[in-house]
Image (spheres, rainbow, N blue to C red):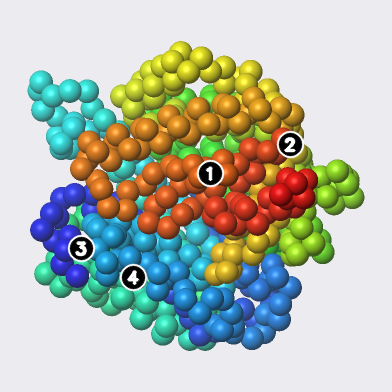
Amino acid sequence: MNRHHSNPGKNLITRALRAMLIFLAAWSPAMGYDGKPAPIMDLIPSDALVVYAARPYSFLMGESSTQPADETKGPTVSLTSIVGFLNAAGLIPGDGQVYADIISALPLLGRYEHALALLDVSTKLVQPGGDDDQPGRQKKILRLDKLQVAVVFRTGESCKPVTEQLYRVMSRYTNRDVAALSTHKAGEFEYQRLVDDRLKEWAVWEWGTIGDSFVLTFGEGAYDRVVSVASGKATSISRNDWYRRGAEQTHVRDCFAHWVTDFTQLRERLGEAAEGRVARVAAALQADDIRQDMWAVGIEGRALTWRRYYRRGTEDVTRLYSDPSLYSKDHLRIVPDEAKHFAIIKVPTRWLVDNLPRAWVAAQSESNYRKWQTAWQRLEQERGLDIGGNLIEHIGETVILFDYPEHPLRIPFALTIAIEIDNGRAVSASINSLLEAWSRYLDERAERNKTVLARVSVKRDDEGIWYIQAAIPGPALKVTDRYMVISWSPQALRDALRFIEPEKKARR
């Protein structure tokens, strides 16, 4: 419980945020979803920067939602047990335990309706190693200044199991010597506050029940903002005119999950300190003039629909990326009959493959940005790669998604993804070169940092399947003649490939 106390200055805010992620995935209240459209967005402030909301997994699967989640479903040996064994064997040291805690708790995210909102964020420029200006020091670097996050779970009448799990998670990251817990009241709502001497003054945890929901916030003032909305003193996002129009256009009322991003406010809140980095990311995504964006995943029988509503400049645009009436039989043939849900999406895939990595690099610090640019250029020169000609130009605009094989722990969005390509040999050569380079980079970094146990690595098996190894084998990828296929584990990918490459199975 006190293992972080010996080094109180090291990445404390990062640990606090990780603890929040673990809590989001770990609690398991006794009350189930009652099937009624819960006004969970009525608790989210209208000016939230980013919001993600999702129904319980039972909604997606069409199961009865009037009963509590069936705890008997799933494997006898859970992922939590496996991670516990690895930890007991000493294979998950230090920060690896944080990663393992998050992974082992993910299955519970799909059981209950929830919303996650970024309410505010700001940045500042500081001297390396401190906040104060010091002559002769190197150029200032960008750091997080303040953050407000709110999480809302629809728990029903009892939230005792929620608070029990919350205290269990908090105990891993704090202790009585550095933390203080107190009770407060905002209007008619009573809530708890946790402060930690090692964190910034604004980095506080607050939680309590509001109506039939349990609310957890991080950041000074975040809980008060949710209470103001619940009390009618502030406007909720569900009453925001643009959100209401978007919700109607994307059929949010009947969807499984949706998310909203207010790019205009993000740029304003991040401020001048982050202006250069924000501009680089926006340019990489060709999204300089996108102001607000909403995506929604709906259900029509077995088909998943993907709708989007966004404001570019002064124009609001509605797009349907997955229309079941237009599904091609050629692509439908690779969807297993056992898949409970699937979608065939028409998206600018080449644009995504080309621009998303650029945006990720653009989001790095100035020094890392230059390093990544240099490394990428060296890779192209040493390998003779033409990423545009050998990879991007061979990617089509069709993406097939399906939930086969079903994840044994029922994790939402644990899908198999098949991206259409027109030259398997060229794409395979490019992917192999890129992942070999990434594998070397991760191994070299691990050696420099003296990381040996449970380090993240990229591996390739005898069947040409690439996968990420981080204590437990993770996402896997393989290039076939017609598709670049990704699934949630190497074995899941092998199972899916039986339908995507039936001719190879027959030859065997």
Task: Between residue 187 and residue 248, name the one nearer to us.
Answer: 248
- Point out which mark residue 85 bears: 4
Q: Position of residue 208 (x, y in %)?
A: 40, 75
Report the amino acid beneath label 1: Asp
Alpha-carbon neighbours of circle 2 within 10 Å: few (<14), some, or many (≥20)? some
Q: Which residue is mark 2?
A: 482
Q: Earlier in the sequence, mark 3 or mark 2?
A: 3
First in sequence, mark 3 or 1: give its number: 3
Q: Position of residue 457 (x, y in %)?
A: 39, 44
Q: Secondary structure at mark 4?
A: helix
The residue nearer to you, when weighing 462 against 407, is 462
| Residue nearest the viewer, comparing 359 with 288 | 359
Badge 3: residue crowd in 10 Å (few <14, some 14–19, many ≥20): many
Residue 196's disc is 3
499 sits to left or right of 18: right
The three-letter amino acid code for the residue at tag 4 is Phe
**Dot 1 corresponds to which residue?**
462
C-alpha separation, residue under disc 4 versus residue under disc 1: 28 Å
The mark that comes first in sequence, 2 or 1, is 1
Q: Earlier in the sequence, mark 4 or mark 1?
A: 4
In the foreground, 3 or 296: 3
Above or below 73: residue 223: above
Q: From the image, state whether disc 4 or disc 1 is nearer to you.
A: 1
Quarter of the figure with the N terminus: bottom left
| Element type at mark 3 | strand
Q: Are marks 3 and 1 in contact (CB under 8 Å)?
A: no
Q: Which mark is residue 165?
A: none
